[in-house]
Amino acid sequence: MIEPHISFGDLDAALPFHVILDDDLKIASVGPALAKMISGIQVGESFFDRFTIARPHDEASSSEAIGKIDGRLVLVQPNDHPVQLRGAFHRLEGGNGFLFTSSPLMNKAEDIERLGLLINDFAAHDPITDFLFAIRARDVTLDELRGSIKRQRLLTQELDHRVKNTLSAILALVSLTKGDVDHVEQFTDQLEGRVHAMAMAHELLATTGWKKVNLSTLILTVLGGFTQRDVRILEVEGPNATIDTHQAGPLSMAMHEMGMNALKYGAWSKKSGSVSIGWTVDDDMIRMQWTETGGPPIATEPKQGVGLGLVNGFVNYELRGEIELDFQQDGLVTRISIPRSTDC
């Protein structure tokens, strides 16, 4: 009868792929991980009914033969399983049998899943755990690299899309501006202002990593240049709100055209004039109101030029919103409603 100096529980934890053989080379104990890997192993059956010593070759299946390889590295082949075991036989104290300590011989991390094993099935001191952790770290690194390449590809596609859209928008602005001026200097000034408004929107998006843009920040950025001239008055008030990336460009352009219209014909054409912009946010929409006061009185509704025509186009088509131009005697009141960002 074999009486180990440690409990079988301790032995199972320290050597989960062990086999204890008695004097007759019958299996007296099997480690839990080995029993999990090779189902059906029975205590009491002959070791060599289940296993063959693959290396060294031509070893007889006897205690004397195993004694000759005591402590040497051996490869043992389960008779009904493709994965070999690498380990060593150790004669037990008193010569009453052998302890075979082993670990599966694996070349790929996928072998663990194929064997139905987990990393916890291996002893902490087993060198294979270092291999498994290295493989896991490699897989994580490869996954991160694949993710980075995928993100880079998407960013490149998005950049290509944005560049094409920007160039198309600039060409459209050139065409519209050309039909709205009488001389080259006027064409240059108007086109420069419109392209600059587009550039400011792109700069804002770049600072946020092409994420949502704060509405108040966008308005002050686009219209700040107007108020610096002759200290024109601009009042901006509303709750915290953000707009989506695809809304930033069209809204910047609309605000620029409104500012240019106020500068040429409206409140900002007079030093006493002022523009106030306020907004509210409900479940679906951001509702803005542009109010001009202190400018020249409006007797009749004027004919809309290219600038306000652009505003209508940006709001109705680019922003998928609604716009109402109310030419009151005291000044223009413009109401703009655009779909709200989900994070407003």
Image (cartoon, helix red, strand yellow):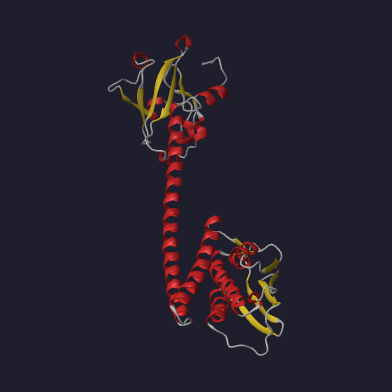
x and y, in percent, of residue 14 in the image: 52, 23
Residue visible at 56% across and 22% down? 10
Q: Is residue 183 above or below residue 4?
A: below
Q: Nearer the viewer, residue 28 or 326?
A: 326
Residue sitting farthest toward the top: 94
Q: Is residue 38 visible?
A: no
Q: Nearer the viewer, residue 160 or 264?
A: 264
Q: Position of residue 70 (x, y in %)?
A: 38, 15
Q: In the orientation shown, which residue stands out farthest toward the left?
A: 58
Residue 133 rendering spot, x and y as whole percentages? 46, 34
Q: Is residue 111 visible?
A: yes
What is the quadrant of the C terminus in the image? bottom right
Numbered-mark total:
0
Residue at 36% of width from left, 27% of height from top?
76
Going 57% across and 24% down the picture, which residue do you hit? 9
Q: Is residue 1 above or below residue 176?
A: above
Foreground pick, 183 / 35: 183
Is 262 displayed left or right of 71 in the figure? right
158 in relation to 65, above or below: below
Residue lying at the far bottom of the rendered structure: 300
Q: Position of residue 145 (x, y in %)?
A: 43, 46
Does residue 290 appear left or right of residue 17 in this picture? right
Task: Name the residue located 64 percent from the left edge and 82 percent from the top edge.
Answer: 325
Identify the image quadrant of residue 284: bottom right
For residue 302, which quarter of the picture?
A: bottom right
